[in-house]
Amino acid sequence: MRKVLIIATTLFTVVLTAQKGENKKGSLDSIQKLDEVIIATNAILGNKYVAKNRTGSAYYLSPKELKKFSFTDVSRALRIVPGVNIYEEDGFGLRPNISLRGTSPERSSKITLMEDGVLISPAPYSASAAYYFPTIARMEAVEVLKGSSQVQYGPFTTGGAINMISTQIPNEFGGQVRASYGSFNSNQLHAKIGGGNDNFGYALEYLNYGSDGFKTLPSGKNTGFNKNDVVAKVHVNLFPKAAIQQSLSFKFQYSDEVGNETYLGLSEEDFNSNPFSRYAASDNDKMTTDHRQYMLTHKLVFSKNLQITTTAYQNNFARNWYKLNDVTFNGDKQSIANVLENPTSFSNHFSILNGSVNSDVDVLGIKANNRKYISKGIQTKLDYHWYNGDFFHDLEIGLRLHYDEEDRFQWVDKYSISNQGDLQLTTAGIQGSDANRISSANAFASYITYKLKFNKWTFTPGIRYENITLEREDFGTSDVTRSGVNLSERQNSVGVFIPGIGFNHKFNNELSLFGGVHKGFSPPGNQEEQKAEESINYELGTRFNFGKIKGELVGFFNDYSNLLGSDLAASGGTGSLNQFNAGEVNVNGIEVLLNYNFLNEKALFSLPFSFGYTFTNTEFLNSFGSTDSLWGTVAKGDEMPYIPKHQFNATLSLEHANFEINLNGRYNGAFRTMSGAGDIPDNEKVASNFIIDASSKYHVNKNLSLTANVINVLNNTYAVSRVPAGLRPGHPFGIFGGLEFKF
């Protein structure tokens, strides 16, 4: 199959602009003009050239980079990008915790997540915790935007935005099948087919991905997961011969997941002796999900300089994470997080968790965290660009009307446990008797950005406006029919302007300077008069290309006037999702990216090397207390938890026309799991780790390739987190073989 539409369009643009550049006296050179043409309506950047010439820090994770290791874990894919902080949870990247430039990482709730340019979190305004995350294995590219001039993408503008680009419709008939199998019965089957011409195109895709899991239960039960993805796309040019071109595109995506995953980790002692074990009390824990996305995009092209793109979208997500929540001994009920933090103090509770005693009835509370989400809206973007002598102008105006909601209808079942580890249901809960409420948000967003290019200077001022009304209807745990007899309501509203400006100056083809300043914003909760998260963010960087060394060096500083924390069960809290003010915080750091090819371009082999480093420093400027165990009691001068100071990633590849071998090493520095200063106490620390992954591919012919992947080559045993409850291990050594067939 030939390269997909986005790549073909890029190549066409290069040729077209080069031809025009030869005949236009005094114009900018053809390479500079590449980023002035809209490449894809679903993309922020569209290619690496645009990322490297933006007036803010950006990274385009290309199809080639994603294919090197055939990433199925988004955590491993994003480690390549400087400025990205991630702490793992399940070892497979199903629910990553992503931070950009020191934003709060839990459930990726403080960054703007998109798929094909559309908000993809289950309820990005009213409940932004990303319990659904798109499968990275079906993505064609990933775009990461940080820093200034990112006001187009909200509502979260502090750290940045991540846009995942799904498989594009090809410009001629073709397809691909990829399959692999390996350790822990991990398996993958990925098939796609599509075709098109100037006026019509389509693509169909299926992905199945699963594993038996690398953890063990006393019962021998599977601790893995199984996930399915289906995507269908159709594109039609409506009036091919009309003066004003119009096209219509439709996308449908469906996914489901069944995973035997738990919030229950391990005590320090048990992790040191058997890090891949699980306690008997988590035997029934299971996550089931169902996700649907509908997108209809209309594109109106008035001329090569003016177009309007409008997209209507709806995402539906349903999940029920049936998982152990609490344990009771002699009437004393404790959360599993409390028990795992203090297994000696709660020794009797702990004996129930590990299944070493015959318990009383109703001692284990297993909560059905049953929730349904809706996210829908319509967004439109106008792009008009023109030349005026040696000046290039680009005006972009965007509007979005959006609604989302989270509907909680939860209950708790009570169990007993035997000293053989067997669970017995003793009291079935009543549906809706634990949480019975709807949180919702109505939002209007708009932005205007303007790009001015003259000679070696580029300026991009812009402003965004968000108007948000957040509501909660709590029917109460005794009104499971939702008659409204005990209805409690609350509402919070916010309207905010979010300005930003960036610049880029090219000294020559080898050196440029860029930077900017913009306002950071994150929506508040639905508590009345709660303040939004706000900051002023600065960055200054340089991009360079000296001989065979290419790279980027960026310094950033985020000055929070009010940081918001969220009460998430995933971070050891109660799970209420209530936000709380954390006050003033400073986050600053350095990002380094280097690329070098040890061999000449004309050599038979290629030996590219890339290196990325991130330094992040955080500091609370005031003291406060919180019930969320991810924050705890905070004193002035404390550092934020779950943000390592140092991390780096290095990739070395040996490439030939017939084969390739890739090595990737990543270092994640130690980080604290509670706010604090000075040396990190052992019981509040996740130690540093260095993990090496490897991949290889042999091309039997132009249609068939054989693949091999190794995760954690050195088989290092390491902890990735102490939340939601107890220590959790990273993925151990795993080896996988497969094949790729394309036609």
Image (cartoon, rainbow, N blue to C red):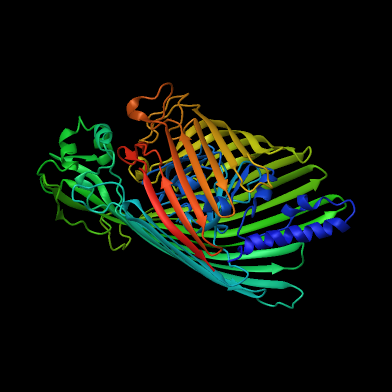
Res. 195 image quadrant: bottom right
In terms of depth relative to the viewer, which is nearer, 126 or 131? Answer: 131
Q: In this view, does 575 lie to the left or right of 231?
A: left
Please state, as top left, top right, bottom left or bottom right, where the N terminus lies in the image. bottom right
**Residue at point 34%, 45% (across, down):** 575
- Relative image position of residue 692 (x, y in whole percent): 45, 40
- Relative image position of residue 593 (x, y in whole percent): 60, 37
Res. 517 image quadrant: top right
Please state, as top left, top right, bottom left or bottom right, where the C terminus lies in the image. bottom right
- Relative image position of residue 574 (x, y in whole percent): 32, 43
On screen, residue 458 above or below 436: above
On screen, residue 298 above or below 419: below
On screen, residue 1 above or below 161: below
Q: Is residue 93 left or right of residue 240?
A: left
**Residue at point 25%, 40% (across, down):** 335
Q: Is residue 470 left or right of residue 500?
A: left
Q: Report whether residue 625 is seen.
A: yes
Q: How many marks?
A: 0
Q: Report whether residue 113 is seen.
A: no
- Relative image position of residue 186 (x, y in whole percent): 35, 55
In terms of depth relative to the viewer, which is nearer, 430 or 629? Answer: 629
Given the current orientation, which residue lies at the most extreme right position?
A: 25
On screen, residue 549 above or below 375: above
Q: In this view, does 541 lie to the left or right of 361?
A: right
